[in-house]
Amino acid sequence: MSELTPRDDIRKTISEILKRVDQLLKVGEIDHAMREIIRAKEIDPKNIYIHAYEERINFLKQEHERHQHEEQTRKQAEEAARKRDEEKRKKLEEEWKKQEEERRKKQTEEEQRKKEEQEKQRFEETIRKEQDAYNLQEKQQGPQQPPPPSKKSRFEAFTTYKQTLKEVWSDGVATDDEEASLKRLRAELNISATEHATLEKEVKLETYFSAFKRAWATGSITPGAASMLTDLRKKFQLTTEECEQIEAKLLGELRVGRGPAQLVIIDDDQKFLGVVTETLQDAGFQVRAFTSSDEAFKYLKDETPDLIVSDINLETSTMGGFSFYEKVRELEHLAEVPFMFLSGLTDEVLIRTGKELGVDDYLTKPFSDETLVATIKGKLKRFKQLKKAQRKK
């Protein structure tokens, strides 16, 4: 038996490697199989079987990547469809709730209208009976005391008296002369003391609400002007509890009517700026977008947004991100407005520099829409909490 030559040893080694490669491919270990092929090529670079296996592995790898891409695309499409369905469902629910609220509101208004109509009919029926009784008595016993000067229905009498009360209480508690006039009018309209007390209470609440709303809108009353609020409460002679209920109602309305947060965004990448602007607008913010810090600074000299977001690397501007930040902070009305940096740069020195300047946050591109919106909401919430704490001090 002849001894094995070096060439035979190489063939044997290559054969063993290719067997392992074949086994690895059967179990899907493509990367491991490729490493074995690379080792085999180092031993015998010209072996055609090695090159055939390499081509096969490359093909399988491409197929695997293609399948992965298709699977990822399919999942993304399914997720997008799920989100669309979810948004559609939420929209339908909101529409249903809106219709239900409108229906209930109409039902309440209709019930109130029927109640008022029934009350009016009851008042008129009472007056008619009183008039009939008076006429019958006059016919049987001769002329009696004349009927009341006012022949208005009870409903009309109540309406007239309530309107007069509103005029009297429009500027606060009634004067002596006004009280005397009201007393004469009650006698004329046959308004009892109990009815007067009920109507006057309603009018005081309504007029206080209007007065408080006007004072708040003009700035006469603020969270820090406690004395002005106390004077207004005394003026309408209401209890503290009644005043607080009215004030809570008005402030609730003001909160509902409050506009969205105002954001200023600066980035010289117009495409990126458009995407970020659209994302933030979809999230409910009002956005002013600028492609240069110069334009933004000109706008900010006269405006006070709720938050400023700027890129660091502004190549088309005379002021870079850091210079722009320092110029903004020099403006008194913007000294405390939250400021964030956006950048594709990941240099630790730049990040540290921004933090040392006092920037409120720093986001590096790329980032998700959810991260951007959540970060901005968090900064706005924190800023409001700080302002609230400052007012309490």
Image (tube, helix red, strand yellow):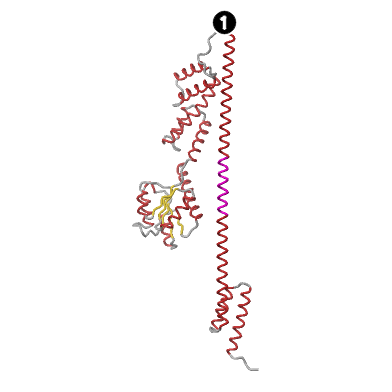
Q: Residue at x 58, y 82 (%)?
A: 49
Identify which residue, 122 or 1, lies in the foreground.
Answer: 122
Mark 1 residue crowding within 10 angstroms, few (<14) / some (14–19) / many (20+): few
Report the magenta residues as a range. 82-99
Q: Position of residue 245 (x, y in %)?
A: 53, 33
Q: Decide: is 13 above or below 382.
A: below
Q: Residue at x 55, y 6 (%)?
A: 143
Residue ranking furthest to the right = 1
Q: Decide: is 3 above or below 253.
A: below
Judged by its main secondary structure, the magenta piece is helix
Q: How many marks?
A: 1
User: Does residue 155 appear left or right of residue 274 in this picture?
Assistant: right
Per the image, label 1 sits on a secondary structure element best described as loop
Residue ranking furthest to the left = 318
Q: Position of residue 39 (x, y in %)?
A: 56, 80
Q: Report if residue 173 lies within the magenta region.
A: no
Q: Which residue is mark 1?
A: 142
Q: Position of residue 338 (x, y in %)?
A: 43, 50
Q: Decide: is 111 above or below 95.
A: above
Q: Which amino acid, mark 1?
A: Gly
Identify which residue, 320 or 280, lies in the foreground.
Answer: 280
